[in-house]
Amino acid sequence: MNTNLRIGDVLKEKGYVTDEQMNQALAYQKEHRDMRVGQILRELGFVTEEQVLDALASRLQLRIVDVAQLPVDVKAVAMVSRELAEKNLLLPISVQEHHMVLAVNDPLNYFALEEVRQQTGCQLEICLSEEEPLRKAVSYYFAEVSARQAASQANVGFTTTAADDLEIEDLENSDDEAPIIRLLNSLLERAIKTGASDIHIEPFEHETRVRMRIDGVIMEYVTIHRNIHAPLIARIKILANLDIAEKRVPQDGHFRVKLDEGNINIRVSVLPTVFGEKAVLRILASAAHLDHADHFGMDDFSYSQFAPMLNYPNGIIYITGPTGSGKSTTLYMVLDYLSGRKVNISTIEDPVEKNIPGINQTQVNVTAGMTFDVGLRALMRQDPDIIMVGETRDGETAGTSVRAAITGHMVLSTLHTNDAVSSIVRLQDMGVETYLVANSLVGLVAQRLLRKVCPSCAREMETTEQERLFLGRDVKKIHRGMGCSHCNHTGYSGRIAVHEILPVNNEIRRMIVDHETIEEITKYAVEHQHMRTLKESGLILVKEGVTTPEELMKISYGE
């Protein structure tokens, strides 16, 4: 490779830049010495990244690759230091004997390439990648390497005696280099980089299994030595301000970690099991991409039904769905929107998952006697216009919320029900008087999350006879992901929300008071209010190729 070659010369050869443009770029570089010429030319708008890569590929006879589509060997990644890879934006793809395939964005960075050769002892086969996909891949795979190395080091470094000693005495004041601390930090980083919502740390007789929930599905991750379990749980308890010595009863807490993505809240639940304490770490405030973010994650039709509810001066709106269906995320988006109005907004939450400027947020503390019901009663004396109750768990909270709505407050809360209309029965089962339910409700929103087909490996295919029976005869084709490195070979990447929205009008209030059935209320809502059920909302996404029939079945419940 010609080490005297410069990017400007390559681009001029291809006719992508002029001498005048190059002179401008070089003059700009004198003021911004940390930037490379290729970056400057792109920033000034003289060339596109595609043109730069095309010119380099043509001149140096290199291939351009999509790193998201490539199977990446984690062993190859581990051969190069993370600092070198992140600083110079390069990623080992594979290694065989002394031959390594290396993806780079700048093949003219000869010093970085030489350092890779020295670290690995390999001959390099260079391929080119666009900057942003490569940056994401570097972040993802080195988080994976760090987590596995930390687990391996902890496995090797612990004996039974050492683990028992470390559990209480050493963890609270140890530095970040301690094996257990490094292990937990790496697991958290890996989970966040991967977009996991939960980390499960599960003890068994001979080992501890770590699993992660990604896009709603539990996936095996790593197995660690049984001796490591107790000190790892102890470290989690210290961070979450839980009682280390207490191992007989469940404990809940939370802590915050700081990564490149910002401050991220971690909710902790510890539960005694036969072989020790199981810990589940829920990762909150994810910076993941959200479809229809300007419409609270709703499509245009759902938003048109939901938005008018927010203009009511009083009443209660419930967001319903099972755990992990994105209810809290939707509520926070709504609160962020409402905070722009001249209103006093107060919340009672367990825990406070996200801090919103201009909103008074209160944390539930059961030990101190601060329950949802107690906190809600206190909030009503704080002259609020809008109250958000994190979760309606019992009859007392439900009753107080409903009374708050009737006495002139707008109340937002979540409820665990299968669909929107079932919330009415759920409130009645909690002991709320029927007339209070009818007079307080403004609207009910049922929400689910469906996994999206991975765009990188999606393929169109014919529907089977069985699928047409479920989807409808008119659905001839669907999309499925074949599995690639971008989606962890699952065929899915990311999730999208679907909604069933029931605005409560006078007729529905009458039906509630008359104790009419869920089926009758649903029939009225579909026929007269054009309510779209969860299945209908999901079916639209299947037809559009966004999700699959298998995902739709999860929310249909035999409809």
Image (cartoon, rainbow, N blue to C red):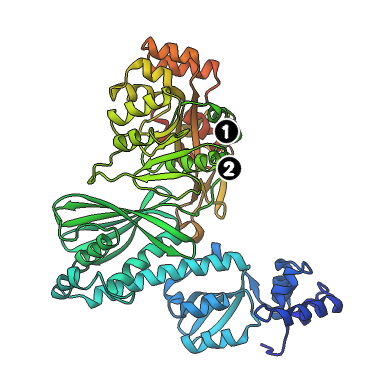
Residue at 34% x, 21% y: name it: 425
Classify mark 1: helix, strand or loop: helix
For the C terminus, give its image quadrant.
top left
Check disc 2 and give the amino acid type: His
User: Is 174 positioned to the left or the right of 129 in the image?
Assistant: left
User: Is 391 positioned to the left or the right of 73 in the image?
Assistant: left
User: Is 60 positioned to the left or the right of 266 in the image?
Assistant: right
Q: Which quadrant of the view contains residue 199?
A: bottom left
Residue at 42% x, 75% y: name it: 75
The label on residue 29 is none
Q: Which quadrant of the view contains residue 319?
A: top left
Q: Which quadrant of the view contains residue 541?
A: top right
Front-most of residues 377 and 311: 377
Q: Position of residue 13 (x, y in %)?
A: 81, 79
Classify mark 2: helix, strand or loop: loop
Residue at 35% x, 16% y: name it: 434
Front-most of residues 53 and 369: 369
The label on residue 303 is 1
Q: Position of residue 24 (x, y in %)?
A: 81, 77
CA–CA distance in space, label 2 to label 1: 10 Å
Q: Which residue is mark 2?
A: 292
Residue at 52% x, 32% y: name it: 537
Circles 2, 1 touching at the beta carbon (< 8 Å): yes
Check disc 1 and give the amino acid type: Tyr
For the N terminus, give its image quadrant.
bottom right
